[in-house]
Image: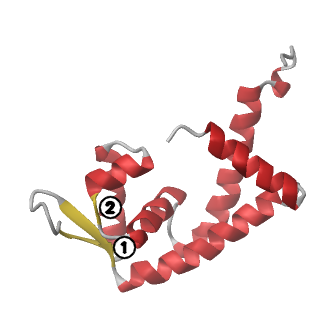
């Protein structure tokens, strides 16, 4: 369905919905000193020790960006690089104790941001919205 009103076009709506969520998410994470991207990396590392290359691939980021994110997490004492268990040429990234604690708090903050953001929708509509985004996401 096409509209001549630019504020009803899909690109406009997606941009503004994402920007609104990003602001809310950043506000919830700010007290923890981490960004949304850093939280995504913490979540990925929290699942298992993983190489920087695998992290970048999983999160759809280029390697240079991933190195900068891991550098930041390492500088804040939230993650450490070590030798990969099966490939000595790769760096494995693991959470520190502070990283695990921050991750637990970041999950709660992120969940609160999502709940607040989706509060304009009924619970069934919020679930449909999430399923639709998942179907459309190119990962």
- Whether residue 14 is visible to the viewer of this picture, yes or no, is yes
State the image coordinates of residue 71 (x, y, percent, origin top left). 30, 61
Q: What's the CA distance linking mark 1 and mark 2?
A: 10 Å
Location of the N terminus (image quadrant): top right
Q: Which label number is shown at residue 70?
A: 2
72 over 20 or under it: above or below: below
Secondary element type, mark 1: loop
- Percent x, y for residue 127? 78, 55
Instruction: Give percent across and percent down for residue 118.
Output: 80, 57
The one of 81 and 57 positioned closer to us in this rendering: 57
Residue that lies at the very extreme toward the left in this rendered image: 88
Q: Residue at x 40, y 51 (%)?
A: 58
- Image: 133 above or below 24: above
Left or right: residue 50 versus residue 14 is: left
Direction from residue 14 to residue 97 in the image, left or right: left
Q: Residues within 10 Å of mark 2 (few under 14, many from 20)?
A: many
Q: Residue at x 77, y 65 (%)?
A: 115
Which residue is depicted at the point 53% across and 79% down? 104
Tell me which corner region of the image, top left, top right, bottom left or bottom right, holds residue 126. Answer: bottom right
Residue underneath mark 1: 76
């Amino acid at each position: 369905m096409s509209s001549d009103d630019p504020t009803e076009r899909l690109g406009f709506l997606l941009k503004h919905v994402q920007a609104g969520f990003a602001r809310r998410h950043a506000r919830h994470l700010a007290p923890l000193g981490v960004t949304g991207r850093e939280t995504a990396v913490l979540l990925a590392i929290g699942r298992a020790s993983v190489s920087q290359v695998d992290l970048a691939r999983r999160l759809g980021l280029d390697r240079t960006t991933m190195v900068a994110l891991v550098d930041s997490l390492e500088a804040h004492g939230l993650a450490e690089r070590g030798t990969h268990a099966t490939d000595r040429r790769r760096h494995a990234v693991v959470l520190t104790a502070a990283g695990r604690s921050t991750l637990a708090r970041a999950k709660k903050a992120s969940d609160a941001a999502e709940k607040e953001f989706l509060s304009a929708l009924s619970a069934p509509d919020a679930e449909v919205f999430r399923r639709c985004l998942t179907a459309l996401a190119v990962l």
